[in-house]
Image (cartoon, rainbow, N blue to C red):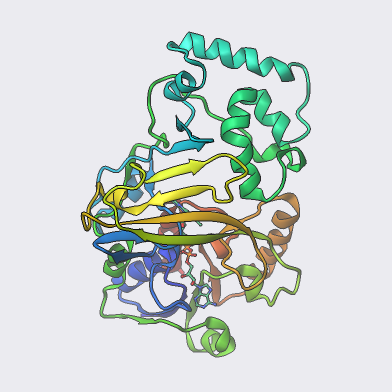
């Protein structure tokens, strides 16, 4: 039996803790927030599961992960089909025949392709120098201006003409009337919320959970007192930013209770014009098909924000500078024989939930062999 410390009760830490406990190891999970679950945390308000740190839709094509997660929750059949609001006109997403029909009145895939190709001509023979040109070369000006430009500029806090082209590598176009955002085989939301799912993972006699506990209050003591530390916090912070600071984008959430049954008719509406400062409005009850109090609904406006030390680091900015810096931190991490780094902050990567589960399962398998 080994004694593990898991720093962070997000999905990575919780899957790892579960697997280690199942194999008979003793696990202490410390969490600096006052709740478990990390960013997938949901809180019940008016009978509605509120996604406290942004909308989370589980989707995967990894059958192993999908089968694994079923033991902790029953998943509903929620399918992500966001709608864009541009200056009051509604467009289906992702870009598909519904969108093209709403944009141009076209009806067939051939008509849509003709229109897109005609619009892409604007960039014919030119090498895109920035995100704006890249997007126009992929999808044409109409869709770029109405559905991409403002949203992307809000996300990055900069004009599209100043952003590098590589941010948008592809803009998939779907020539069917299919509003399902993801191409994955499996998709859904855990009935009763993500927190309940994580509670079930951590419900083991040999797992102890300590909330409101920051690893950095007793870093050396923790490392000395445990056989192994699985650290899912920020990698640069672990090393006291000695090589410099990795950059992130942050978010601000504004949540409001409304005395209405149904505010916007969909879980996710994107606001794609620059003038409206938020990017999305989430109406949480639609993730569970209207469950909750009949005359109440909870909405959250999502505002992209610059990040500075102390803010919540939501999205890593994986540009060349940061990726190079991360590699140097990774070299330091490899020299730590008692500490392993996992999850989106420990590995400085945007990971979807399925990938996080897969990585945590790989780690728990590897550790057992040591
Ligand atoms: P986290 O959830 O961040 O967990 C890390 C935990 O460590 C946190 O609880 C933190 O408080 C704790 N911690 C950090 N430092 C310390 C410390 N010093 N001491 C103690 N505790 C510490 N994925 C999808 O698959 N579908 C989606 O729809 C989706 N939507 C998303 C929307 C947003 C806005 C964001 C930001 C992410 C989204 N994701 C989505 C990704 C998903 O959130 C991640 O895959 C997942 O939450 C990562 O889990 P984690 O354990 O690595 O990190």
Quadrant in the picture for residue 315: bottom right
Q: Is residue 370 left or right of residue 263?
A: right
Q: Is residue 123 above or below residue 340?
A: above
- Report the side of 24 relative to 175 (left or right): left
Foreground pick, 87 / 36: 87
Q: Is residue 70 left or right of residue 2?
A: left
Numbered marks: total: 0
Q: Is residue 290 visible?
A: yes
Where's residue 155, x and y in %?
61, 48
Please give left or right for residue 243 compared with residue 109 in the image.
Answer: right
Residue nearest the viewer, comparing 313 with 184: 313
Residue farthest to the front, as pictured = 259
314 or 112: nearer the viewer: 112
Q: Name which quarter of the figure residue 309 lies in.
A: bottom right
* Residue 46 at x, y percent in the picture: 26, 63
Above or below for 38 versus 89:
below
The residue drawn where x is 43% and y is 10% is 108
Q: Quadrant of residue 199?
A: bottom left
35 in relation to 12, above or below: below
The residue depicted at 68 percent of the width and 51 percent of the height is 157
């Amino acid at each position: 039996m080994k004694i593990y410390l898991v720093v962070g009760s997000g999905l990575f830490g919780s899957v790892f803790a579960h697997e280690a406990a199942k194999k008979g190891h003793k696990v202490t999970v410390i969490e600096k927030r006052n709740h478990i679950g990390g960013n997938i945390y949901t809180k019940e308000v008016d009978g509605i599961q509120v996604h406290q740190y942004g909308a989370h839709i589980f989707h995967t094509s990894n059958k192993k992960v999908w089968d694994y997660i079923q033991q902790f929750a029953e998943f509903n059949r929620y399918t992500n089909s966001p709608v864009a609001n541009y200056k009051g006109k509604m467009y289906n997403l992702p870009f598909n025949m519904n969108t093209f029909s709403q944009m141009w009145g076209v009806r067939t895939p051939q008509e849509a392709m003709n229109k897109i190709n005609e619009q892409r001509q604007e960039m014919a023979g030119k090498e895109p120098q920035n995100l704006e040109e890249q997007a126009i070369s992929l999808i044409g000006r109409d869709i770029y201006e109405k559905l991409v430009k403002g949203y992307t500029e809000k996300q990055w806090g900069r004009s599209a003409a100043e952003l590098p082209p590589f941010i948008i590598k592809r803009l998939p176009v779907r020539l069917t009337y299919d509003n399902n955002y993801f191409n994955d085989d499996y998709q859904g939301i855990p009935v009763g919320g993500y927190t309940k799912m994580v509670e079930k993972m951590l419900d083991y006699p040999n797992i102890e959970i300590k909330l409101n506990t920051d690893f950095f209050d007793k870093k050396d003591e923790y490392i000395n007192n445990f056989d192994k530390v699985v650290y899912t916090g920020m990698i640069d912070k672990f090393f006291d930013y000695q090589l410099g600071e990795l950059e992130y984008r942050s978010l601000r959430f504004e949540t409001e209770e409304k005395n209405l049954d149904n505010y916007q008719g969909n879980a996710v509406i994107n606001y794609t014009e620059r003038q409206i400062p938020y990017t999305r409005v989430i109406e949480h009850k639609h993730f569970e098909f209207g469950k909750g109090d009949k005359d109440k609904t909870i909405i959250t406006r999502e505002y992209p924000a610059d990040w500075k030390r102390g803010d919540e680091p939501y999205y890593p900015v994986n540009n060349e500078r940061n990726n190079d810096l991360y590699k140097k931190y990774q070299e330091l991490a490899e020299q730590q024989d008692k500490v392993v780094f996992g999850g989106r902050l420990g590995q400085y990567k945007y990971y979807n939930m399925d990938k996080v589960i897969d990585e945590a399962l790989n780690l728990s398998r590897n550790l057992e062999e040591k």
